[in-house]
């Protein structure tokens, strides 16, 4: 029975007297003197322990500082605070004060009968009274905890009553469509037909020309299989994650995560198991907003149910865990029935899943569709890459118009733009580049967008600057031609300068920028498209150095302190520091024979950050140079554009985790 606080207050101070000559009052090792009573409070027998401050007793103050009301199945403590105020405490006796020792270690009973009264009331096996009462309180706490767990689990049980039955055809669908299939055959020399067993149709078959671990087709059922020689067959374990979407009501869906294992010790009788690992209730609350309730199946001992609220704990966080993985194959045989009548009825989830043809996470798609219903148009139009970026990559800005009534309004483009975007099946960065170029009066087609993707060009700035003076087709042709000529070109240290087309484009963009400042005549195609790009680039860089040094030295010097705080890092004999002035940047480029000295203007204007990697023991000698733009490492070069050594790569990875990620997080916040 729970303690009645109002009734307990009447017994907070019993008005007991103390013999001023009692030796306990002068025992310095004790902080509290304990008196006891047994009263009937609110219809239950209650043991009362009064804790008097020993120092206050010697001063004639006879009011207890703590009063413990101890019942058989409950307890509570009333504390007398400063200013004659009272405070209820639910802590156990030994946890009453936060100190290094237990609270009862500094307490002593005033009389022997006080101690005996406690022992008799608690009915514990301990002869020591404080141990007896602590044991009773521990038992009560366990009972309380059990009741709290049961209360929480009863709510989960009620929630799980809404879970529909598992679809009847699920196991068969998993076996046919999801799990890998094999033909286990008895190998014979000479190319003669061999006896085999197909795990798809579960029949004996005859196969010819089969090779171990090579894909083929079953001659009986026609399904794609992998051939496995019985003599070489080892223990095979196949694991897959499967998702099943079901309707709870018109505004709520349930996503169930199943873990599937197929273990082949006996090819004819594999150990095939399908077990549920997680459930996600996704509810539409109001336009644009969804509420999600995750539950995971626990394998630990439980009281009422094995289902626990929340996602499955995952430690360590960045290592793959099959049990925690919620990305899997989607069971779509029931999709039309499930989504009909719900806010997701036009979500095109099944069509999107069939288009990408691989595993996916369903929850982000369901949430994003409620926020951006226009995803329906994108899927129907075949812009699956754009949908993937919007749903699964949160770094992109909001590029869709939520209120768009059709595809054109949703994307903010004109009708003649749609075929280009569709043919290229643009990604988000390509779509943004297309719109930006169009705003600047530059028209590109699907061939340029595909070229941009295939060449792994990740810098929109390089393209924008290059296209100020060239057409898209001429730029593509020039970059590809130069890459074919220069891809094997090495500097004096034997390092490739142009290992990929984006390196060609980056140098060409630098040449255009420098030439513009040097007032080159880019109307001349000979000047616009130099035959020897490396030589033209390096020559322009030398001509512009003196001018840049004088103009931007002040801005770089002023930004030095802030960059030093954010980026400085020392580890394993290497140190990363920012430049103090433009002179250091120019010297860095000249010493290492690369083009960083052409970046002085961009550094001064804050368009990028240049950092130096130096050997700690020789901090003044240039070693490697690093460019950071938009929170990402864009390039790193040593002498004559040499690639970083394994030691420098390891150092850079540590710096990105320790420093760069922290700076990006701070900017985002």
Image (spheres, rainbow, N blue to C red):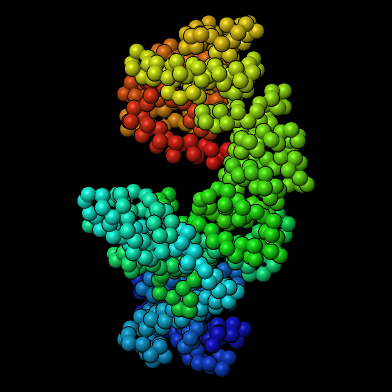
Residues 98 and 239: in front is 239
Q: Residue 50: horizontal and vertical position, in percent?
A: 48, 81
Q: Residue at x 69, y 64 (%)?
A: 340
Q: Residue at x 62, y 10 (%)?
A: 516
Residues 577 and 402: in front is 402
Residue 472 in view of the camera: yes
Q: Is residue 485 left or right of residue 475?
A: left
Q: Quadrant of the N terminus?
A: bottom right
Residues 543 and 172: in front is 172
Snapshot quadrant of residue 20: bottom left
Q: Is residue 117 left or right of residue 383?
A: left
Q: Residue 29: horizontal and vertical position, in percent?
A: 35, 71
Q: Is residue 141 left or right of residue 427?
A: left
Q: Residue at x 58, y 57 (%)?
A: 363
Q: Residue at x 41, y 64 (%)?
A: 201
332 w.r.t. 494: above or below? below
Snapshot quadrant of residue 476: top right
């Amino acid at each position: 029975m729970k303690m009645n606080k109002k009734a307990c207050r009447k017994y907070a101070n019993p008005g007991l007297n103390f013999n001023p000559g009692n030796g306990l009052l002068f025992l310095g090792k004790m902080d509290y003197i304990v008196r006891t009573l047994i009263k009937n409070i609110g219809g239950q027998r209650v043991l009362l322990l009064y804790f008097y401050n020993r120092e206050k007793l010697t001063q004639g103050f006879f009011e207890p500082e703590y009063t413990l009301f101890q019942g058989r199945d409950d307890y509570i403590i009333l504390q007398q605070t400063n200013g004659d105020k009272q405070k209820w405490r639910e802590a156990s006796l030994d946890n009453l004060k936060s100190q290094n020792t237990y609270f009862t270690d500094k307490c002593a009973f005033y009389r022997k009968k006080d101690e005996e009264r406690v022992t008799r009331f608690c009915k514990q096996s301990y002869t020591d009274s404080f141990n007896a009462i602590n044991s009773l309180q521990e038992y009560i706490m366990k009972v309380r905890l059990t009741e709290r767990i049961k209360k929480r689990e009863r709510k989960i049980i009620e929630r799980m009553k809404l879970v529909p039955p598992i679809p009847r055809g699920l196991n068969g669908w998993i076996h046919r469509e999801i799990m890998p299939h094999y033909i286990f055959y008895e190998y014979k020399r000479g190319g003669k037909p061999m006896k085999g067993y197909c795990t798809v149709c579960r029949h004996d078959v005859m196969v010819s020309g089969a090779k171990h671990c090579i894909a083929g087709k079953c001659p009986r059922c026609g399904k794609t299989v992998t051939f496995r020689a019985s003599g070489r067959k080892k223990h095979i374990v196949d694991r897959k994650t499967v998702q099943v979407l079901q309707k709870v009501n018109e505004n709520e869906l349930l996503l169930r995560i199943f873990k599937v294992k197929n273990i082949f010790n006996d090819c004819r009788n594999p150990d095939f198991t399908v077990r549920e690992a997680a459930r996600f209730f996704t509810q539409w609350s109001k336009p644009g907003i969804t509420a999600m309730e995750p539950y995971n199946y626990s394998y630990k001992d439980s009281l009422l149910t094995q289902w626990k609220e929340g996602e499955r704990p995952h430690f360590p966080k960045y290592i793959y865990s099959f049990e925690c993985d919620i990305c899997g194959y989607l069971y779509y045989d029931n999709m039309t029935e499930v989504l009909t009548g719900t806010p997701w009825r036009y979500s095109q989830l099944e069509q999107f899943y069939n288009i990408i043809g691989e595993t996916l996470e369903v929850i982000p798609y369901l949430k994003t569709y409620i926020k951006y219903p226009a995803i329906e148009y994108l899927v129907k139009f075949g812009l699956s890459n754009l949908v993937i970026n919007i749903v699964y990559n949160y770094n992109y800005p909001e590029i869709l118009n939520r209120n768009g009534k059709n595809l054109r309004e949703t994307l903010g483009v004109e009708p003649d733009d749609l075929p280009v975007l569709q043919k290229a099946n643009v990604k988000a960065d390509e779509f943004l580049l297309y719109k930006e170029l169009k705003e600047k009066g530059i028209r590109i087609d699907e061939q340029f967008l595909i070229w941009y993707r295939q060449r792994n060009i990740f810098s929109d700035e390089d393209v924008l600057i290059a296209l100020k003076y060239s057409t898209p087709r001429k730029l593509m042709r020039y970059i590809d031609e130069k890459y074919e000529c220069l891809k094997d070109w090495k500097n004096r240290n034997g390092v490739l300068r142009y290992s990929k087309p984006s390196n060609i484009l980056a140098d060409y963009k630098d040449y255009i920028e420098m030439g513009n400042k040097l007032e080159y005549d880019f109307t001349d195609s000979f000047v616009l498209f130099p035959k020897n790009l490396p030589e033209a680039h390096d020559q322009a860089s030398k001509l512009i150095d003196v001018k840049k040094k004088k103009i931007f030295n002040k801005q770089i010097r002023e930004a030095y302190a802030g960059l030093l705080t954010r980026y400085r890092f020392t580890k394993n004999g290497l140190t990363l520091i920012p430049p103090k002035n433009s002179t250091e940047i120019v010297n860095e480029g000249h010493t290492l024979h690369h083009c960083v000295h052409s970046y002085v203007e961009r550094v001064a204007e804050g368009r990028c950050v240049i950092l130096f990697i130096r050997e700690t023991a020789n901090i003044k000698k240039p070693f490697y140079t690093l460019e950071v733009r938009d929170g990402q490492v864009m390039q790193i070069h040593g002498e004559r554009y040499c690639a970083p050594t394994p030691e420098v790569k390891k150092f850079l990875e540590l710096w990105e985790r320790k420093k760069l990620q922290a700076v990006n997080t701070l900017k985002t916040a």
